[in-house]
């Protein structure tokens, strides 16, 4: 474990090394948030940019397409062909899906996709949650993440990582009063004064350090430590039972340094916004032109009264003429704006289809799909492949947390998508005998709409089984449960067809009274069809086995045909002789 001073020193060196990268991230953040200032003196101080923010449009569309489908974990059986091993592998997959569902993984993936595309990084930390008794995924802001450098740029697991965030003095006093009260000095510090908190995560421990005061979120420097007689203080140190790094930070694939997808559009956006602002200034001056008093030859001009066109006030001039200076914004301004917009779309791969438009040279839907596919499909595929590798490492950390913190305890989970009876019990040390598994998207590079179409085409051509299609469909949470439901519905449909066919025949087994009883069970008592048929059959058997006295109502066929089992058999009359026996035999 490191001391508070060592953690602060490590943070200082990493922050200085990542300065240019973090500054570029802040520029992207400001543009995405609409905090761009157009540097023109003629504009109002509160004036905002009046051009379309293509970065936000492209970022939202690309990230939503990346996260529109969820990957699926696959745990191979330890012994292929053994039913027990298959059942164990199936339970592992269901347990991991339940952990994902408890962490709202699909919602987190949407935020992580935005971080990956905009900032080129998508850090996440997995820690034990003792309230839910599950590993908990927490998405962290790349602007405040300082991970250890890795030798392999494609390795998403750094050895250790430092997260920086800001709290107020009042929060520090309320949470860690006994540890920081002497340094803060109660009553001498502004309660809203911000202090920097450093969370150091390593395979040995998770340590929390109060580093020092900050002027604001972007200007904190380690030189301010000690401001107000405050020094770095170690507040908490929690041992890491897993022995693994708890932080996973996938990166975009670039040449030599991290670079977001939309870094290249910043300069073009500023230029387009500035040119649009200048055009607005020229238009405003054209509406309210500058006026000059021009003297006539040999006369001394004089303005007797000023004109006001808004109120209809007529101006009076003596010895001169009023001339207006007309402003021409320039005949190529619109062309320049359109050219800059096109360059932004090409640089950031932001097709016009993202905004519900289409190029004028596109005549067919097939051609539009081809252009959109060439623009975004491979980028979506690469982002999803990066998340596949990242989620494998994240799942391994989650399994280590399960074994390290609740290994001997019996736990339960609910299988996502399963209704009644969906709870399953397991002991982590017995279930997670190993952490080897795969995480794959059904079709990396396809969004949810393209995936469904592709699945239907492969099923139609016979290249894919229905079970594989169910596993690939993002709307099906439990393929095994879906298979059982399909079989159940098919058998139920066959049973219903059989009942309908036999009920039409007057000589069939379903007599009117039996059919009415079956309908009553299904409609009024809400009994499943298979159970209703079973009860109706047992009722008919009991009736046919019961002996009733001759002339009883139960011995009559009623609405049914005689001899079809709708009536109960009659008892033999005592001493009836041969005639009575013949009557019983004849019904």
Image (cartoon, helix red, strand yellow):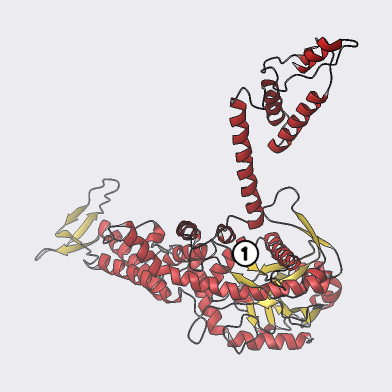
- Whether residue 363 sits left or right of residue 109 in the image: it is left
Residue, far front: 578
Q: Quadrant of residue 544?
A: top right
User: Which residue of the protein is positioned furthest toward the right in this rendering?
Assistant: 574
Quadrant containing the C terminus is top right
Q: Could one spot residue 391 in this view of the protein? A: yes
Q: Residue at the location (74% across, 53% down)?
A: 422
267 displayed left or right of 480: left
Vertical side of 523 occupied by 113: above or below: below
* In this rendering, position of residue 55 left or right of residue 170: left
Q: Is residue 40 visible?
A: no
Camera-side residue: 268 or 47? 268
Residue that mark 1 sits on: 108
Q: Nearer the viewer, residue 527 or 330?
A: 527
Above or below 189: residue 289: above
Quadrant of the rendering where the N terminus is positioned: bottom right
* Residue at 70%, 71% in the rendered image: 77
Find numbered disc 1 in the image and state the secondary structure of the residue it sits on. helix
Find residue 70 and report its horizontal and vertical position in percent: 58, 63
- Residue lying at the far left in this picture: please name it: 297
Name the spot of residue 190 as percent of width and height, x first: 73, 69
- Residue nearer the viewer, 231 or 107: 107
Give the crowd class for mark 1: few <14, some 14-19, many >=20 residues within 10 Å.
some
| Residue 496 location (% of width, % of height) | 62, 35
Q: Quadrant of residue 114?
A: bottom right
Closer to the camera, 194 or 548?
A: 548
Residue at image point 30% right, 66% down: 338
């Amino acid at each position: 474990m490191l001391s508070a001073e060592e953690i602060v020193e490590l943070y200082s060196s990493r922050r200085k090394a990542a300065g240019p990268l973090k500054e570029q991230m802040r520029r992207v953040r400001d543009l995405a948030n609409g905090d761009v200032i157009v540097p023109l003196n003629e504009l109002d101080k509160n004036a905002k940019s009046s051009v379309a923010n293509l970065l936000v449009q492209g970022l939202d569309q690309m990230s939503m397409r990346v996260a529109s489908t969820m990957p699926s974990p696959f745990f191979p059986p330890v012994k292929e062909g053994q039913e027990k091993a298959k059942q164990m592998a199936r339970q592992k997959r269901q347990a991991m899906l339940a952990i994902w569902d408890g962490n709202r993984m699909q919602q987190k993936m949407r935020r992580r996709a935005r971080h990956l595309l905009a900032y080129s990084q998508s850090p996440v930390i997995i820690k034990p949650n003792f309230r839910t008794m599950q590993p908990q995924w927490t998405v962290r802001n790349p602007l405040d993440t300082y991970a250890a450098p890795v030798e392999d740029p494609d390795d998403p697991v750094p050895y250790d990582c430092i997260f920086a965030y800001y709290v107020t003095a009042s929060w520090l006093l309320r949470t860690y009063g006994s540890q920081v009260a002497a340094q803060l000095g109660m009553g001498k510090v502004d309660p809203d004064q911000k202090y920097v908190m450093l969370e150091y995560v390593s395979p040995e421990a998770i340590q929390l350090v109060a580093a020092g005061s900050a002027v604001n979120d972007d200007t904190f420097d380690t030189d301010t430590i000690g401001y107000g007689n405050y020094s770095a203080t170690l507040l908490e140190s929690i041992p890491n039972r897993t022995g693994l790094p708890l932080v996973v930070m996938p990166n975009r694939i670039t040449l030599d340094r991290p670079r977001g997808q939309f870094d290249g559009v910043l300069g073009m956006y500023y230029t387009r916004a500035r040119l649009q602002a200048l055009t607005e200034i020229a238009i405003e001056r054209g509406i309210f032109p500058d006026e000059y008093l021009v003297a006539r030859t040999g006369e001394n001009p004089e303005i007797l009264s000023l004109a006001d066109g808004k109120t209809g006030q007529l101006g009076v001039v003596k010895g001169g003429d009023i001339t207006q200076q007309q402003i021409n914004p320039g005949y190529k301004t619109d062309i320049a704006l359109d050219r800059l917009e096109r360059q932004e779309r090409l640089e950031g791969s932001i097709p016009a289809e993202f905004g519900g438009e289409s190029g004028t040279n596109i005549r067919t839907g097939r051609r539009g799909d081809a252009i959109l596919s060439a623009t975004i499909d491979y980028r979506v595929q690469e982002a999803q492949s990066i998340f596949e590798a990242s989620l494998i490492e994240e799942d391994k950390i989650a399994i280590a947390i399960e074994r390290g913190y609740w290994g001997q305890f019996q736990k339960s989970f609910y299988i996502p998508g399963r209704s009644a009876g969906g709870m399953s019990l397991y002991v982590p040390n017995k279930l997670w005998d190993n952490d080897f598994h795969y995480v794959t998207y059904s079709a990396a590079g396809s969004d949810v709409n393209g995936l469904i179409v592709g699945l239907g085409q492969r099923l139609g051509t016979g290249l894919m089984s229905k079970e594989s299609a169910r596993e690939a469909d993002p709307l099906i949470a439990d393929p095994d449960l879906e298979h059982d439901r399909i079989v159940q519905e098919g058998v139920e449909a066959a049973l219903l067809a059989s009942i309908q066919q036999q009920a039409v025949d007057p000589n069939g087994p379903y007599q009117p009274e039996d059919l009415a009883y079956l309908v009553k069970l299904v409609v009024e008592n809400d009994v499943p069809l298979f159970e209703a048929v079973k009860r109706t059959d047992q009722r008919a058997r009991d009736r046919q086995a019961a002996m009733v006295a001759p002339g009883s109502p139960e011995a009559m066929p009623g609405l049914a045909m005689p001899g079809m089992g709708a009536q109960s058999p009659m008892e033999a009359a005592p001493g009836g002789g041969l005639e009575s026996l013949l009557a019983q035999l004849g019904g």
